Image (spheres, rainbow, N blue to C red):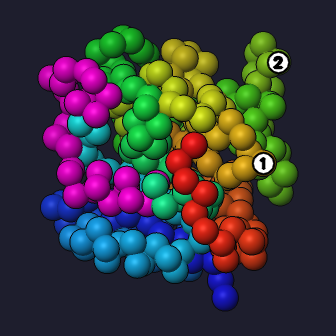
Amino acid sequence: MKPRIAISVPHSTNAQYVERSLPPYVHAIEAAGGEALPIPLDKTQDEIAEMLKQCHGIVLPGSPADVDPEKYGEPRHEKTNPADPQRDAADELLLQDAHNMRKPILAICYGLQALNVWRSGTLRQDIEAELRSPVKHSAGSKVKEAHRVNVDPESRLAKILADAPGTTLNPSPDFTAMQLTVNSSHHQSADVVGDGLRVAARSPEDGVIEALEGDAPDDQFVLAVQWHPERTYDDDPASRALFKALVNAAEEWQQSDRAKGEPEGLS
């Protein structure tokens, strides 16, 4: 059986956004060898929990919403978008299940931010206003190459990308990181990094966190990127590598003792 990957439906009320954005995630998961299982946001907690019993990994996708800043103890910035409580509730169930059972996690854009806050981290609520950055982090889906990111060469992310056939990684000017060009559609980013996470990539021009990963990679596959690899899956080896790494990790989990055992509890 192919590893089944749960993915939150991106938004509870913006049907047009969901119709446009969800299919590329499903395509990427399934092209990488998995089976995508979208999680409807109108399901009850018990119904979602039952669906998650069938799953071997999770994807947290992007969203036009922003995480409610009350969740990380800050006043709302005037440019912070309304939260999506149903999406928040579904993400929290997916994250709790994945954490308890050590299932692999791939979080993308808003998903990175949701993961970081769930792990007790904080967010920059508007990069442009807070940093006066020259980088076009909110370039949008029509811009395929928005800016560069420096990837920590000691990170899990670097290993995934370096092992991907056809991936081009350039040395950064200071030779302490590898460099990748990415798309970009966000105005918020991680600030204080959450518990159990480490920075795997930053924007070299302004230091914005572009990727996070678990700080105990032998325990659980946790990877979060601020760009959108699902949009470039068919054309970009680096994008394919991220989804293939998730599916491979889910397949390993599927075959592990953890898939047959009891939850380990929150640590």
Determine the secondary structure under disc 2: loop
Does label 1 or label 2 sit earlier along the sequence?
2
Residue 126: horizontal and vertical position, in percent? 30, 23
- Which mark, by number, is residue 112? none
**Mark 2 closeness class: few <14, some 14–19, many ≥20 residues within 10 Å:** few
Q: Which mark is residue 218?
A: 1
Q: Which residue is drawn at 29% across and 51% down?
A: 88
Tell me if I can see residue 136 in this picture.
no
Residue type for callout 1: Asp
Q: Quadrant of residue 164?
A: bottom right
Which labelled disc corresponds to residue 175?
Answer: 2
Is 85 part of what is drawn in magenta? yes
Say which element carries label 1: loop
Residue at 48%, 49% in the rendered image? 108
Which quarter of the figure is the N terminus placed in?
bottom right
The image quadrant of residue 12 is bottom left
In the displayed structure, does residue 151 sit left or right of residue 262? right
Question: Is 45 drawn above or below residue 241 in the view shown?
Answer: below
Measured along the vertical axis of the image, is residue 78 above or below residue 160? Answer: above
Q: Determine contact: label 1, label 2, CB under 8 Å.
A: no
Closer-to-camera residue (50/164) = 50
Foreground residue among 96 and 172:
96
The segment highlighted magenta reads 69-95
Residue 263 is situated, as x and y percent measured from the top left of the image, at 57, 63
Q: Dividing the picture into quarters, in which one does residue 162 lie? A: top right
Q: Residue at x 75, y 71 (%)?
A: 256
Where does residue 267 sit, x and y in percent of width and height?
Answer: 57, 43
**Is 123 situated left or right of 83 in this image?**
right
